[in-house]
Amino acid sequence: MEARVQTQAPEVEAPLEARTLRSETLIVLALSLGASGLSALISFIGSVTQPGALKNQAATLVGSYAPHRPWLDLAWQLFYIATALAPVALVAHLLARERVGMGVLGFDLSRPRRDLLRGAAVAAVIGGTGLAFYLGVRAAGFNLTVVPESLPNVWWKIPVLIASAVQNAVLEEVIVLGYLLRRLDQLRWSPNAALTASAVLRGSYHLYQGLGGFFGNMAMGVVFVLLYRRWGRIGPMVAAHALIDTVAFVGYALLAGKVGWLPTG
C-alpha cells in the first residue's frame, strides 16, 4: 500500500521582525552612543563624589593623545576620528540591506544648499542659547568647566578640530536622530515616546559635563527631533551640529585666556 504523500508544506514560523529590530538597535547603541551614555554616567558619579565643586573640575572634549610628539598625536587624532564613524558605516550597511540607503534619513547631497542654510539658522539660535545656559549652570555649580580643546599649537590643530566637529555631528545625528527614530517608528513607538527616548539618549552621553550638559543637550534633542519630523532630513541637523561644535572648538582655541567671560580649565 502506497504511503500517502503530503502535499501541503509544513507551517514555517514567521520571522520575529520586531525582535530582530530591537536586537539590532540595541547592538548599534551598544557599539556607539549607548555605551557613551553609560560611560558618561560613571564619569559623572566620579565627579560628584570627588571633593570640591563641579565647576572646579574640567571636562576636556578634544585633547592630546601623545603630548610633545605631534606626528604621533596627529596619527592618534585621525585614528579616533575615523573609528568613531564605524557605527555610521554599520547603519549605512543595515539600511542598504533594507534597500533604502542613507537617503531615507535625509543624509545625502540631494539638497546641500537648503540643508546648510537651515543648519546655519538652527546653529545660530541653539549655539547662542546653549552658551548662555552653560555659563549659567556652571556659575550655579551644576556643571564642570568644559574645555573644548587642549591641543598643542601645531599646524594641524584647526583642521583636526573641524574634523572632530564634523565627526561628532555625523555620528550623533545619524545614530540618535535618523536611525533610532526610524527603528522606533518601525517598532510602533508613539511619536512622544520616540522623541523622549532620542532626547534622553542625547542628554545621557553628555552627562560627564554635569547636569547642565545633560539637560541642555536633552533640550537640543527635543528641538532636533521636532525639526527632523517636520523636514524629513537629518542633513540640516548635521550641518547645525557641525557648525556649533566648530565654533566651540575653534572659538575656544582662539579666545581662551584672552576674554574674561570664557571659563578655562
Image (cartoon, grey):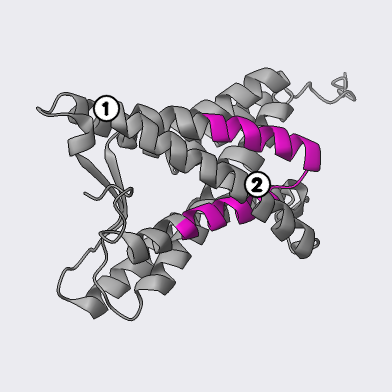
Residue 34 position by quadrant: top left
Query: Does the stretch in magenta take in 53?
Result: no
* Distance in Å between CA atoms under marks 1 and 2: 28 Å
Label 1 is placed on what type of residue?
A: Gly
Could you say where residue 63 lies in the image, as x and y percent from the top left? 27, 59
Disc 2 marks which residue? 122
Position of residue 127 in the picture relative to residue 61 (left or right): right
Residue that appears at 72% across and 47% down: 105
Depth check: give the residue in front, 54 or 194.
54
Residue that appears at 77% across and 48% down: 104
Q: Which residues are magenta?
A: 219-247
In the image, which disc is placed on residue 141? Answer: 1
From this viewpoint, is residue 233 visible? yes
Could you say where residue 167 lies in the image, as x and y percent from the top left? 49, 58
Residue that appears at 22% across and 31% down: 54
Residue 252 position by quadrant: bottom left
Label 2 is placed on what type of residue?
A: Val
Provide the secondary structure element on which disc 2 rests. helix
Could you say where residue 120 lies in the image, as x and y percent from the top left? 65, 55
Picture layout, residue 142 above or below residue 190: below
